Amino acid sequence: MHENEKIILLKKIMLLKRDLRNREVAHRKAMASLFIIFIAAVLLFVGAVIFLNHKYNETKAMLNQKEEQIEFLERTPTVDIGVLDKIEKLRYVVDAGISTDLILYADEQCREWNLHPQFLWAVVELESKFDPNADNLAGSSARGLGQILKGTGKYLWEDILGNPKGSYYHDMAYDPYVNIQLMCCHLGSSFNRGCLLNEAIKAYSGGTPGYMEKLMNIAASHGYDLSDVTCRYPQEG
């Protein structure tokens, strides 16, 4: 083969190799772009699924909530529509496992003793975190939702509420209805003696340091500004 023909052939081979490399680079870039688009599409799909699932669960929770309210109204057909508002304002209490029946009983006791229900439930949250079977970790006799002490429970039940002497036994404090009644009696009696909020709380907590601040923080976390005025049962109308 002539020398010039060899040179031309080598040049053609080099050009073909360079063209092949360029095609390989372009192919890799194209595949990388397709992979990125694929990943983006997958992420978009997953995001859409998560969003729709969240919306589904949100809607399902709302429906369950409404069904619960309807079931309650069916059980108590004479209840007025304001009950739904009371329950809705205390949704966090329901979510903590407290029954709507107990919430309405607590509302009745709060009305009787002129206490704001959110004030009462803030004390419950601080004392027991809504656990009706709570015992005092320090080993005292405090029990139940409001951590009622044995001597205090007996005094409130028999001397203030007027039940027969010797009728109180401390396991009664595990009954959430009894505990709520004793809590309202304790706090309400303090106010009836002319105590201010901080004095009533001091009497209830035994002067526990920082108790008032913790209580106000809990109330504020639920949109309730606790004060000497707002701790009383809300006026209707």
Image (spheres, helix red, strand yellow):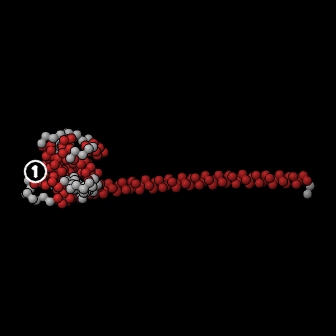
Which image quadrant is residue 154 in? Answer: bottom left
Name the residue at the right extreme. Answer: 2
The residue tagged with tag 1: helix, strand or loop?
A: helix
- Give left or right: position of 11 versus 26: right
| In front of the other: 110 or 191 | 191
Q: Quadrant of the C terminus?
A: top left
Residue at 48 percent across and 55 percent down: it is 46
Q: Position of residue 31 (x, y in %)?
A: 63, 55
Q: Residues within 10 Å of mark 1 (few under 14, many from 20)?
A: few
Residue at 73 percent across and 53 percent down: it is 21
Q: Position of residue 164 (x, y in %)?
A: 7, 57
| In front of the other: 147 or 228 | 147
Does residue 32 show up? yes
| In front of the other: 62 or 173 | 173
Does residue 80 show up? no
Residue at 62 percent across and 53 percent down: it is 32
- Give left or right: position of 169 versus 39: left
Q: How many marks?
A: 1
Q: Position of residue 83 (x, y in %)?
A: 21, 51
Q: Position of residue 191 (x, y in %)?
A: 15, 43
Q: Which residue is mark 1?
A: 160
**Mark 1 is on which residue type?**
Ile
| In front of the other: 146 or 47 | 146
Q: Quadrant of the N terminus?
A: bottom right
Which image quadrant is residue 114 in? Answer: top left
- Give left or right: position of 25 versus 12: left
Residue at 86 percent across and 52 percent down: it is 8
